[in-house]
Image: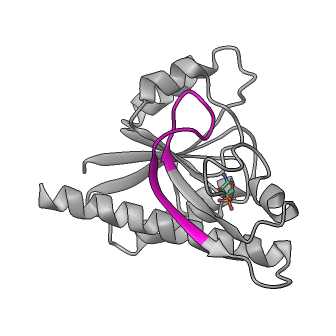
Amino acid sequence: MNRSWAVFVSGKGSNLKNFLEIEASGRLNNQRLSLVVADKACPALEIAKSYGKPQFVLSPKEEAFSDLLIERLYQEQISDIFLMGYMRVLPLSFVSKWRGLLVNIHPSLLPKYKGLRAVERAYAAGDRKLGVSLHHVVEHVDSGELIDQRELLRQENESLEDIFVRIHSLEHQIVEDFLIRLESEASAR
Ligand code: GRF
């Protein structure tokens, strides 16, 4: 096993579920989802529980946040971190420590619409081209090197809800392709 992932979540957990389903399909021989980290109780934790995954809830208000988090990641022998709808900005020292091993999925065509409510802002601006970015996490929010990016074209009169559905499935596809690519790279070694 050469990658042991921690997935960080704050919300519904559709991306977490997608990762768990890919793992359950038996296509990951060199990667494992080992820990789910959340900043608060959220539906994603129910999904983690239903797959029997260890979970760790840690409020960023916690004074020793970074130390406690790093300790738990070491305990679980985590090698890589995937932010999947984690709605907090991680401390700079933490990001520096994990640089290169930390990725994020973001629902916009970065560098457009960094930060919160990216889909809503693109929709309100009337953008015809929306999309999803998978990128490395660096010290500035949503600014790291892109790993992959995909577009979708807004249909005439398409509702925000419908766009969200398509954004989520594009996210799931981009993540699946990324994990499978890592898998082939690991097997080729
Ligand atoms: C996703 O759109 C992700 O790109 C963004 O937050 C959302 C999380 O959705 N950062 P879910 O919790 O995975 O359903």
29 with respect to 86 (left or right): left
Figure check: 17 above or below 71: below
Which residue is located at x 76 percent, y 60 percent? 119
Figure check: 44 above or below 41: below
Figure check: 39 above or below 147: above
Which residue is located at x 40 percent, y 68 percent? 177
Give the x, y percent position of residue 65: 63, 21
Q: How many marks?
A: 0
* Quarter of the figure that contains the C terminus: bottom left
Which residue is located at x 82 percent, y 55 percent? 121
Which residue is located at x 72 percent, y 30 percent? 59
Give the x, y percent position of residue 86: 66, 44
Residue 50 visible (yes or no):
no
Q: Quadrant of residue 48?
A: bottom right
Which contiguous range is marked in magenta?
135-151
Judge whether residue 141 is colored magenta: yes
Residue 151 visible (yes or no):
yes
Q: Nearer the viewer, residue 66 or 140?
A: 140
181 with respect to 97 (left or right): left
Instruction: Say how the picture is coloured.
Output: one colour
Ligand 1 falls in quadrant: bottom right
Q: Nearer the viewer, residue 51 or 144?
A: 144
Give the x, y percent position of residue 154: 73, 77
Figure check: 177 above or below 73: below
Give the x, y percent position of residue 187: 17, 61
124 with respect to 87 (left or right): right
Q: Nearer the viewer, residue 180 or 28?
A: 180
Judge whether residue 142 is colored magenta: yes
Q: Nearer the viewer, residue 52 or 98?
A: 98
